[in-house]
Amino acid sequence: MTRPRAIIVDFNGTLSRDEPLLDRLFRAVFAGIGIEMPSALYYQELAGRSDPEIVERMLTIAGREPDARLLDQLLAEKVGRYQEAVRLTPTIDAASVAFVRVAAAQVPLGLVSGAVRAEVSSSLEAAGLQDGFRVVICGDDVQRGKPDPQGYRMALDALDADPVLQPGEVLALEDSLPGLAAAAALGLRRVAVAGTVPVTALAALAERVVPRLSPALAEQLLAG
């Protein structure tokens, strides 16, 4: 693997090991309006997509009209629950913090997430990483979430470099199939983080699959 000139990291499930938390919170939010969301459905159909799309899709699956008022209500409740949960139990661990520190000292870093900025900012601040990324693109910055590559395109444009970065010089780290597909659509190189979907499925879309972020991984990826 040649040395990348920039790295873009996904948030939920990759930097923040929080997919089980997201599953639990979404199930609780939907239960509040009488909708049962099985965990299997979350991981198979929804994980990796933007928060607004997850809410809209689940309402549609349940036969409910996804009107704007209801969407806003459910998203606000989920964001509030998430912020409280990570305040009590941070989901960005020390190894992931160290990964960011080691990588950011060598190449520009970006973050592309389907989560809303309020959630991402709260978690980054709690981990002391509010200045760890040159660009942060969140779900409320884009019109189309992953697997659409819009967020990655915005991040690539914002990661200013001389000479200009080419997609094949940028490495994306993702834990979901929609995320890997979004990075692949732009021609970014891809490393998958295990934990959200089966390793065999990740391996089909990534150069390699790793168990987690760590400072040792950052050194390996940037060793060239």
Image: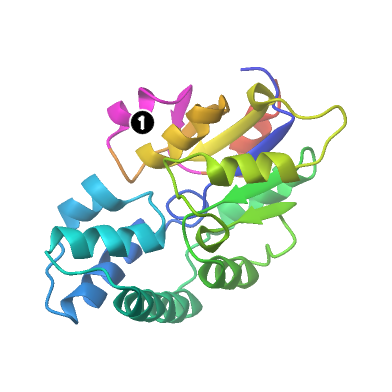
Residue 47 in the image: state x and y as whole percent. 32, 51
Q: Which quadrant holds residue 127?
A: bottom right
Among the 4 quarters of the image, the one containing residue 70: bottom left
Closest to the observer, 76 or 150 = 150
Vertical position of residue 159 compared to residue 76: above or below? above
Question: For this rendering, which residue is in front, 193 or 214?
Answer: 193
Image: 68 above or below 153? below
Residue 94: in magenta span: no
Q: Residue type at mark 1? A: Leu
Q: Is residue 65 left or right of residue 92?
A: left
Q: Which residue is mark 1?
A: 202
Q: In the shown orientation, is residue 118 left or right of residue 114?
A: right
Q: Residue at x 58, y 28 (%)?
A: 188
Residue 57 visible: yes
Residue at 51% from the left image edge and 34% from the top image edge: 183
Residue depicted at 19% across the width and 82% down the height: 32
Q: Is residue 62 above or below residue 86?
A: above
Residues rendered magenta in the picture = 198-212
Residue at x 50%, y 59% (from the top left corner): 139
Element at label 1: helix
